[in-house]
């Protein structure tokens, strides 16, 4: 996720150097790098053969990760791996996957019931700086306008780009008026989703952030659905509270 602000020039931080160059749209592409312990539940879901990065996910316990069903698509467990305990996209540890459970009611359009569980072959060891499970919600935080959530991921910063961030990024969004969001997105928003945005339109998700967490107080509030993002508008999330029973049924 990345921050945008209108200026005459755009400053791009790369390899520790700041370069200035004129841009017609005048946007600053940057972001807040995560520090150790900021989002220890964050994982990257990849394909093992060519190390293709697919999306994000969140650690639930020593064997289970939760992500979006749209991230997994039709990829079988044998062609997936989970990378964890890292702020770098290519760092940390990797585990092969033995099982994928997509919600039985998942639909590609709209992205309803967009949630999936991934079981790892090896153990996800907790207690490291960047490896700890996230809690499931005990109440529905999405019903309160103004609730602030943190999103994280290695997603791209420009539409159509395949260049993912090598550093885990963080951004803050606010859960806001769901009625207005539903008007913008027509009939695409269901009761199992919620909308959030940055009021200053500087923060939004990118390709590859989908499946990743929206958290509050070390609790998983939402799972990002990137498909619905429109520049300077709302990001859309699966409301995890609606699926707590479904999650527990499978991982316990």
Image: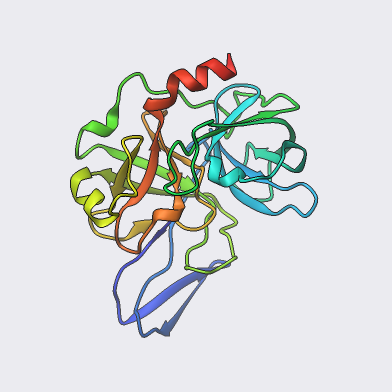
Left or right for 2, reference 174: right
Q: Confirm whether residue 190 shows in the render.
A: yes
Residue name at image x 72 percent, y 48 percent: 47
Instruction: Residue 3 in the image: state x and y as whole percent.
Output: 37, 61
Left or right for 123, reference 239: right
Instruction: Residue 31 in the image: state x and y as whole percent.
Output: 43, 58
Position of the N terminus by quadrant: bottom left
In this figure, what is the number of numbered marks? 0
Q: Nearer the viewer, residue 21 or 206?
A: 206
The relative height of residue 38 versus residue 180 in the rendered view (above or below) is: above
Instruction: Residue 132 in the image: state x and y as whole percent.
Output: 56, 27
Q: Confirm whether residue 177 shows in the render.
A: no
Q: Nearer the viewer, residue 183 or 169?
A: 183
Left or right for 220, reference 42: left
Left or right for 223, reference 92: left
The relative height of residue 212 versus residue 244 in the rendered view (above or below) is: below
Residue name at image x 68 percent, y 50 percent: 90
Instruction: Residue 244 in the image: state x and y as whole percent.
Output: 44, 21
Q: Residue furthest right?
A: 49
């Amino acid at each position: 996720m990345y921050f945008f602000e209108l200026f005459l020039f755009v400053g791009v931080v790369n390899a520790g150097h700041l370069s200035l160059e004129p841009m017609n749209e005048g946007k600053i592409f940057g972001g807040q790098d995560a520090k150790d312990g900021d989002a220890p539940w964050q994982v990257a879901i990849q394909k093992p053969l060519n190390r293709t990065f697919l999306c994000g996910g969140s650690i639930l316990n020593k064997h289970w990760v939760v992500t979006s069903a749209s991230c997994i698509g039709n990829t079988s467990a044998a062609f997936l791996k989970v990378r964890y305990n890292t702020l770098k996209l290519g760092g940390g540890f990797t585990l092969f996957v033995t099982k994928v459970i997509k919600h039985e009611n998942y639909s590609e359009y709209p992205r309803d019931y967009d949630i999936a569980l991934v079981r790892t072959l090896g153990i996800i060891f907790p207690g490291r700086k960047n490896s700890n499970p996230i809690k499931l919600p005990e109440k529905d935080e999405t019903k309160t306008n103004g609730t602030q959530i943190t999103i994280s991921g290695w997603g791209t910063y420009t539409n159509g780009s395949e260049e993912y961030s090598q550093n885990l990024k963080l951004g803050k969004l606010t859960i806001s008026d769901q009625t207005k969001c539903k008007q913008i997105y027509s009939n695409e928003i269901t009761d199992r989703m919620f909308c959030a945005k940055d009021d200053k339109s500087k923060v939004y998700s990118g390709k590859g952030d989908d499946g990743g967490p929206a958290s509050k107080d070390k609790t998983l509030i939402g799972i990002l659905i990137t498909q619905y993002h429109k520049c300077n508008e709302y990001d859309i999330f699966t409301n995890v509270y609606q699926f707590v029973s479904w999650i527990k049924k499978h991982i316990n």
